[in-house]
Image (cartoon, rainbow, N blue to C red):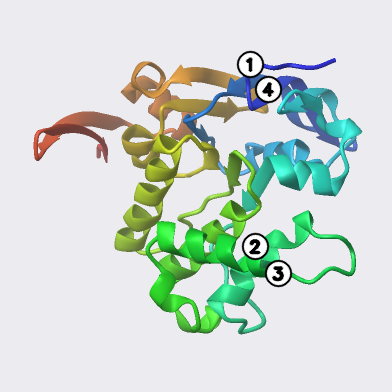
Amino acid sequence: MKEKQSILQVRGLSFSYGVVPVLEDISFSIGAGEVIAVLGANGAGKSTLFRCILGLLRHYGGDVFLEGEDVLSMNRKEIAANAAYVPQAESPVFNYSVTDTVLMGTTGSLSLLENPGQEQVKAVEQALDSLGISHLSERGIQEISGGERQLAFLARALVQKSRLLIMDEPTANLDYGNQQLVLRHVRKLAQEGYSVLLSTHNPEHALQYASKVLIIKDHHLYAYGDTSEILTEKTIGEIYGLRVMIITADADGVPVRSCIPLA
């Protein structure tokens, strides 16, 4: 069975660890150029959702389709060609150069004993240039800032040549400036036609950068739809147990929505 209209389609997804339910009847889809922010309290199942989509957890109920293909019928290489994963900001164990770190993202397109060639090196150069970090190419991955490192990991995902980027809390542990740096590049990639599914604990990230939101509460799909319609003061209060006010400010002629917690 195939689905053609969406890059990713999830139907009735349910998953449990033993008898403990984590996700129950989750359904949504993502098309080209969309940014979907996944929100939910700690333990809501956001990371589990991503692991099911990526085929890392396979004993789930329901269906997951990538580019019209059932994920359970795909091997790791096929999944990687259709969905690129960007983990949380992390400090790598080995101090590979930024170029070598990004080059690792091309291995899925190579045979078992094949080494990266000029085509792969060119793809790395283009990815670094598109994210504005070409000047870091020879720096060690441990020697650059957290925001720059996260952009390097994003470049590593881009060289996989997939149209879907799955980002698990991409701004975690980053300072405010680096959070905005990463999210602005995410928005730029969406404008170029990439589809982005990212999780965040910050409602402002969704308000300012996501076209849609998907909210998980008590293991179920609490709400899904356009950010402007779904992410309200009432909704945020019910997710996090916190009274908030959403305001709209003028930023150089562009309306920007922000979330302010109330005492």
Question: Can you give x and y, in whole percent of width and height, for residue 31 in the image?
Answer: 55, 24
Q: Secondary structure at mark 2?
A: helix
Q: Are marks 2 and 4 in contact (CB under 8 Å)?
A: no
Give the answer, above or below, for where 111 lies relative to 10.
below
Question: Can you give x and y, in whole percent of width and height, for residue 190 in the image?
Answer: 44, 37
Q: Are marks 3 and 4 in contact (CB under 8 Å)?
A: no
Q: Which mark is residue 9?
A: 4
Q: Residue at x 61, y 84 (%)?
A: 95
Q: Nearer the viewer, mark 4 or mark 1?
A: 1
* Disc 1 residue type (three-letter): Gln
* Disc 2 residue type (three-letter): Glu
Q: Which residue is mark 1?
A: 5
The part of the image, by quadrant, that contains residue 254 is top left
Total marks placed: 4
Q: Which residue is mark 2?
A: 119
Q: Are marks 1 and 3 in contact (CB under 8 Å)?
A: no
Q: Secondary structure at mark 3?
A: loop
Quarter of the rendering occupied by the N terminus: top right
Q: Secondary structure at mark 1?
A: loop
In space, the residues marked 2 and 4 are separated at their CA atoms by: 31 Å
* Disc 4 residue type (three-letter): Gln
In space, the residues marked 4 and 1 are separated at their CA atoms by: 9 Å
Quarter of the rendering occupied by the C terminus: top left
Question: Can you give x and y, in whole percent of width and height, for residue 61 in the image?
Answer: 85, 24
Q: Is residue 232 left or right of residue 105?
A: left
Give the answer, above or below, for where 52 lies relative to 117.
above
Q: Residue at x 75, y 23 (%)?
A: 68
Q: Residues within 10 Å of mark 3 (few under 14, many from 20)?
A: few
Give the answer, above or below, for where 86 lies relative to 248.
below
Q: Are marks 3 and 2 in contact (CB under 8 Å)?
A: yes
On the question of residue 143 being in view, the answer is: yes
